[in-house]
Image: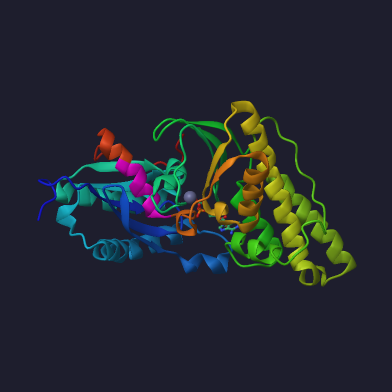
Amino acid sequence: MSNKNTKDILILAIESSCDETSAAVLKNGKILSNIIAGQKVHEQYGGVIPELASRAHQQNIVPVVDVALKKAGVQPQQLSAVAFTEGPGLLGSLLVGASFAKSMALALDIPLIGVHHMKAHLLAHFIDDATGKIPEFPFIGLTVSGGHTQIVLVKNHFDMEVLGETLDDAVGEAFDKTAKLLGLPYPGGPHIDRLAQEGNPHAFKFPKPKTEGLTFSFSGLKTSVLYFLQKKLKENPDFIRQNLADIAASFQHTVIEMLTDKLWEAVRQTGIKRIAIGGGVSANKGLKKALENLAETEGWEVFIPKFEYTTDNAAMIAITAYYKYLKGEFSPLTTVPKARMKI
Ligand code: KG4
Ligand code: ZN
């Protein structure tokens, strides 16, 4: 039965910006399904290989969409719109999701909605079971992923302003590159996080680079870990194995301080004490704890999404598309995905 005569808004959303193929179905602002297929193929290379990512998206997209629709109990003919990640991301990967979404929109004669991936990471907080509470506007968004580290002033669902960002590596990249130096599998963020729980965060001291205002720099930190390890390995070839948890904890502690230092500055500059984080690194247990402590001691209101809405997922694309749908903001079928895209 067609949805066109009923009031229900049913959106199928597709996310394919990096190495996760994901599809979600949303009904009137509620997520009915959120299917995520990861890509194991990159593990052996210690990083995402764009060509292999596009190919894996091609293999995954039909079954992932099929499972998302079936789990939601929704027929394609009932859909009100199809949404996809327009950018930023790996172009070959984005093209798979974009082409699929366009074909569906064309075949079903329904609107197409292109979504900004980083805005979606922040709007993940509006999924009703993301944290159990929804941030009021305006709030400070901190996006921490494999490709981005930004402090964003979120004025409403559509209007966001980047107040500062990284000048070089993203924070997730720093986790992954440091993990690689430690011989940990890709992606290394979760491994460092796990090891850090057992280590002493003050065992080793790594310098925090000084950057202006609300900008970040993580490439220097990775280099200091590299030089530190090279020096220690000369003295003791088994240094990493014997000190793995302490190195992970000390590195993670430094990163968390770099992030919270800038949040302090953002609170000072804006006078806003409401902070919502998004992106893969917001799954980090140490960061979560540090923010919860600040909430308690400084009276900040802190929002950390549920794990399944931190790393790349289509539910966040669906909720962002829902607000665009309500506003009638649709994309033409000529829309092309963009590797780089401003917030
Ligand atoms: O948002 P995301 O899934 O993909 C991008 O848009 O980049 O973020 C992936 C990044 C990776 O760098 C991964 O190592 C990191 O998030 N990550 C973590 C944790 N879980 C994922 N970093 C630190 N601690 C974690 N628990
Ligand atoms: Zn992401």
Residue 268 in which image quadrant = top right
Part of the protein shown in magenta: 313-322
Tell me if I can see residue 38 in this picture: yes
Residue 234 in which image quadrant = bottom right
- Determine whether 230 is above or below 211 in the image: below
Ligand 1 sits in quadrant: bottom right
Residue 286 in which image quadrant = bottom right
Q: Is residue 1 left or right of residue 254?
A: left
Screen quadrant of the N terminus: bottom left
x%, y% of residue 292? Answer: 62, 49
Q: Is residue 206 left or right of residue 125?
A: right
Q: Is residue 137 magenta?
A: no
307 or 239: nearer the viewer: 307
13 or 4: nearer the viewer: 4
Total marks in image: 0
289 or 175: nearer the viewer: 289
* Residue at 81 percent of width and 54 percent of height: 227
Please identify the residue farthest to the right as the structure is shown.
Answer: 235
* Residue at 76 percent of width and 43 percent of height: 208
- Determine whether 214 is above or below 44 in the image: above
Q: Is residue 317 magenta?
A: yes
How is the rendered protein coloured? rainbow
Dominant secondary structure (helix, strand or loop) of the stretch shown in magenta: helix
x%, y% of residue 131? Answer: 47, 51
Tell me if I can see residue 335 in this picture: no
x%, y% of residue 62? Answer: 28, 63
228 or 120: nearer the viewer: 120
x%, y% of residue 126? Answer: 40, 45
